[in-house]
Each structure stands twice: as C-alpha cells, then as structure tokens.
Image (cartoon, rainbow, N blue to C red):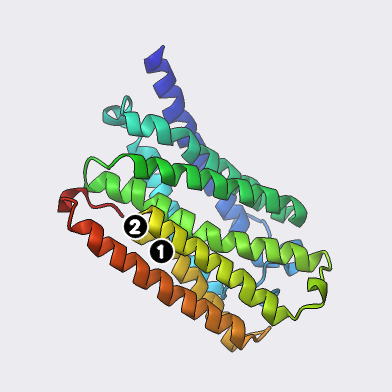
Amino acid sequence: MKQGSDLLRQSIVLVSAVLAIIGSFIGSGAAGGTPIQNASGGALAADATPIAPAVPAFGIWTPIYVGLIAYAIWQFLPTQKTDARQRRLGYPIAGSLLLNAAWILSVQFDQLWLSVPVIVLLLAVLVLAFRITLASRPKNLIETVLVDGTIGLYLGWVCVATAANVTAALVAAGFDGFGASADLWAVGVVVVAGLVGVLIAVAGRGRLTPALSLSWGLAWLAVARLTGSPLSTPAAVAALVSVAVIVTLTLSLRLRSAKSVPPRLATA
C-alpha cells in the first residue's frame, strides 16, 4: 500500500506540472488565450497600479517553470519514490502547480476577484513547502537546486505577485484608499512586501533564492514607477530600499550560517 501511495504521489506531481505548463501557455497568449497583462481589462498590466512590476520582471517564470518541470521528472525516479522528504513535499508542490493553473484561468475568464483567494492560497501552500525544506536538508547538489532552489524562487516571486494582485483587484473594484494618496498606499504595500522578505531571510537563515526573486520583483517595480505610468518616486524608493535591506540581511545570515554548515549541504 505504501508503494502504491508513493506512485500516486509521484504521478499527481507529474500531471500537475503538465497542467501548469499548459496554463502558462494559455496565460502567455501562445495557445490562443489572452496574455495576462491584457486579461481582466488590463488590471494586471505594468501601468495599471503603482504596485505592478515592469514587464521584464515576469521573465522570472522561465527558471521557475524549468525548475518545476525538472523536479516533476526527478521526483518520479525510483530513487525518490520512498524518500521521506519527497513524501512530505510532493502534495504541497502539486497543489501549488494546480493553484497556479487555477489563477491563470480565473484571470483569463475575467474573474479578478476570484484570483485573489487563489493566489493567497498559493502563497500559503508555498510557505508550507518552504517550511518543509527548512526542516530537513537536501542530500546533494541536484536536490538543492531542483527542490530548495525552485521552491525558494517560486515563493519569493509569489510574494510580490500577491501584493500586485490584491492591489489590482482593489483598484478595479474602485477602492479609493480611504482618502489617502496612491503614493502612500503604494509605499505601505511595498514596505509590507519588504518585511515579508526580511521574515523569509530570517526563517530561512539566509536562503538565497527567495531573496533573489523577491528582490527581482521589487527592483522591476521600482523601474516601472520611475520610467512608466503611474509614476511614483516614493514607491520606487521604498522598493529599492527594501531590496537593499533584504539582500544585505540575507547575505549576512548566509555567511553566518555557512560557518556552521558543510559546503555540500548548503541550501539555495
């Protein structure tokens, strides 16, 4: 029965990865769907809100998807079938892949309000997966890259995407900020994202990939606010300061952690 459960888990992860890739093609417009930035009335476009990153930021999905596909194949190998770590990670990762596809579909069908609980749930599942990677170390470099590295990139980016998604939904719903300026709200949201990055850095003891993708998103948010519409120097400055804090803290914790961990077990 245990062997059957393991095969079921591996199969679900692989099928979920395939569905997520199909969803990504639809979301890019390559399979006949509307590109995400144009779907839902353009609510998620780079110029829709002060929290929207510039278009190049979404290039982070390429390494994330490559990592997820590679993981889905790797975890299907016989050597991973009974691995305790993969038994704990399999279903959360499969859940994140299915939620990612569900998010794309909700936006494609102009259900922006539905995309908010979906992406929040996606973030929660990724936090769970991240905590599992913290509880046990990878066995080798391949696992470090495919598992810890991919989950870290995925988590960091979804933190930024959640902030942008919630803001877009509020703006589309006509939220006026209770009279406060758009700049003030933008700075507040960016600061919250920065604090999340700090918490991840501390919890992960300097994990590099979450800091990398979160900082990547915030940096492109700054670019969008300095060079495009809507312009917001305060939001851009807050984003750049957040990047500096996250990177500095992550590297500091990483160096401290490296002194007590053998190099071959260092995590991404």
Note whether 35 is above or below 14 in the view shown: below
Q: Distance between the residues labelled 1 and 2?
A: 7 Å
Quarter of the image with the N terminus in it = top left
* Label 1 with label 2: CB-CB less than 8 Å: yes
Residue 205 place in picture, x, y as percent: 33, 56
Q: Amino acid under label 1?
A: Ala
Q: What element carries label 1?
A: helix
Q: Amino acid under label 2?
A: Arg
Residue 79 place in picture, x, y as percent: 26, 29
Badge 1 crowding class, 10 Å Cα cut-off, few under 14, some 14 to 19, many 20 or more, is many
Residue 39 place in picture, x, y as percent: 71, 62
- Between 180 and 239, the residue placed more toward the observer is 180
Dot 1 corresponds to which residue? 211
Dot 2 corresponds to which residue? 207
Badge 2 crowding class, 10 Å Cα cut-off, few under 14, some 14 to 19, many 20 or more, is many
The residue shown at (35%, 48%) is: 148
Q: Determine whether, in the image, residue 5 is placed left or right of residue 25.
A: left
The residue shown at (41%, 77%) is: 244
The residue shown at (47%, 40%) is: 93
Residue 237 place in picture, x, y as percent: 53, 84
